[in-house]
Image: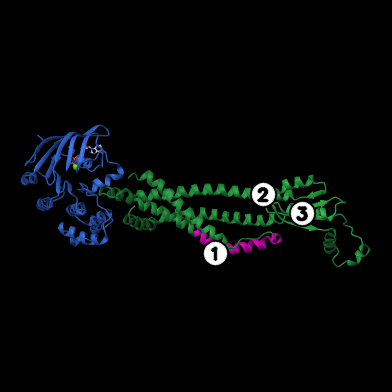
Chain colours: A green, B blue
Amino acid sequence: MSIRTFLYSLTQGINNFFKNRLMTIASVTTITASLFVVSMFYCIVVNLNFILEEFEQNIGIAIFFEEDVVENEILTLKNQLEARDEVFEINYISEEDAWKTFKEEYFKGREDLLKGFDNDNPLKGSASLQVLFSDISQQKVLVGLLQEEEIVRFVRESQEVTDIVQNVNSLVTYTSVVLIVILSIISLFIISNTIRLAIAIRKREIRIMRYIGAKSSMVRGPFLVEGIIIGLVGATIPVIVIYFFYDNVIQKISTEFFLLRDFLVFLPVEIIMAQLLPISLIAGVVLGYLGSRVTVGRYLKV
Amino acid sequence: MIRLENVTKLYPGSVKALDDVSFSIDKGEFVFIVGGSGSGKTTIIKAIMREIDITSGQLYVEGVDITRIRRSKVHKLRRNLGIVFQDFRLLNNRTVYQNVAFALKITETPRRTIRKTVPMLLSMVGLNKKANMKPSELSGGEQQRIALARALANNPPILIADEPTGNLDPQRSWEMMKLLQEINMKGTTVLVVTHDKEIVDAMKKRVIALRNGRVVKDMKRGDYVHEH
Ligand SMILES: Nc1ncnc2c1ncn2[C@@H]1O[C@H](COP(=O)(O)OP(=O)(O)OP(=O)(O)O)[C@@H](O)[C@H]1O
Ligand SMILES: [Mg+2]
């Protein structure tokens, strides 16, 4: 396509965009709505993943040992585990530490009740290793290995929580994929229809253009441009809306689910935008181009 | 320039619009195609510009077998042909000026050239005072002249006019013919389809006569041939 054809298509396409007002509004609205839903799901997925990652790092396992195991043996195991990739962090909690935390948690303000325990540690043999994972899916395997160890009495795991976390994660991801596919098809359909109408309106002009020697790229160009503009505008609006309302919504959710506030950590709007903006714009251009390209191919055989 | 060899055109419903038509037109010629209504005159023009595909035969324009060019290359053929259509085919929502400029725009002519060329063309056909009017506000003859200005915009080597005097009174008809003759004298090959007996007889140009889609006469300096 030459520069002049390109410029012609651009101005003509922009003209058409504003001239076919009703259809333009209808299709831009549809695309805006579709991409808005997709964008919202994107925000949810990204944040959920972020929350789950944080969460994953806070659910780990605790390894408890047989009575006769000495501290050195435990520390050797600690070193072995530390070398593993899936282990994010590992802490040794001695009997004394355990007793100390216990005391602090349950006898706060009632220290008088502790008199009889002065020299005795009632939590004897409760030394443990607390393991946090960087990759929680490896938890099961590691637990299996640990249970084979002779010094290990039992492993307290949180597999149920882990499973739920992973299920929620994949459910949301699948839902988003299905939604994206459905909404993309709807968007393509509406863009294609808009362009079809635009072609119908200009049928006479197109015929005349061809009679007097217009190249096919010049006949088709304006409609492709019109489709791309519809896609772009339809993609920009939801991004702008999300940019301005994101913080408000986050605030709302945080107050609404006050009890979960320790888990609900959200990504800042800038990070969301850094990905959402280019993804949306590209999606808009691609949807607009494909929608108009298909229609132009079918109804504008030049 | 233009050569038809055994061209036959069957429209759907087996209407034989052209039946084994052969003739050839050289560069710089001025040729009338005459014949009664439905004799196939417009069909010849549509075949030459590849608006329709012929059923059989060969058709060359400037040495190119146009039955074989791809759709995407048809614009090259059409840029060699300036055509004044029987039904004008003007854009009614645009001004006279815009209609003529349109032909230059779509051939990617620079703006500056367009701004110089359009007034020239309009004054040639005597419409420079009506440049800002819409075709629907003008008479049939004036619309025909817009179509002529547009056909000439890209300086085509071949000019084809379908019934250019069909809507004109005798005086206007003569003016139109004079215009076409001037254009022909500048080297453009001119092909005129007409019913107008008087004009054909007076011009003493080559005449190709059609009847029921067949060439019945082809005369170097001919008269209008009656069908009976
Ligand atoms: N699209 C079409 N489909 C079917 N038949 C057609 C079509 N176009 C033209 N015809 C038929 O082909 C024959 C030739 O038509 P054409 O338009 O070439 O005649 P013409 O010589 O230009 O007539 P006129 O002087 O009235 O313009 C006519 O019988 C006409 O009815
Ligand atoms: Mg005709």
Residue wearing tag 2: A166
Whether labels 1 and 3 share one chain: yes
| Disc 1 to disc 2, C-alpha distance | 31 Å
What residue span does the magenta drawing correspond to?
A: A237-262
Describe residue A285's horizontal placement relative to residue B121 as left or right.
right
Name which residue type carries label 2: Gln
Q: Residues within 10 Å of mark 2 (few under 14, many from 20)?
A: some
Which numbered disc covers residue A78?
A: 3
Q: Position of residue B88 (x, y in %)?
A: 22, 49
- From the viewer's perspective, is the residue at label 1 or at label 2 nearer? 2
Disc 3 within 8 angstroms of ligand 1 (CB): no
Residue B32: name its quadrant: top left
| Disc 3 to disc 2, C-alpha distance | 27 Å
Q: Secondary structure at mark 1?
A: helix
Query: Residue at point 66% right, 62% down?
Result: A254
**Nearer to me, B225 or B61:** B61
**Nearer to me, A91 or A275:** A91
Q: In the rendered structure, the residue with mark 1 lies on which chain? A: A
Q: Residues within 10 Å of mark 3 (few under 14, many from 20)?
A: some
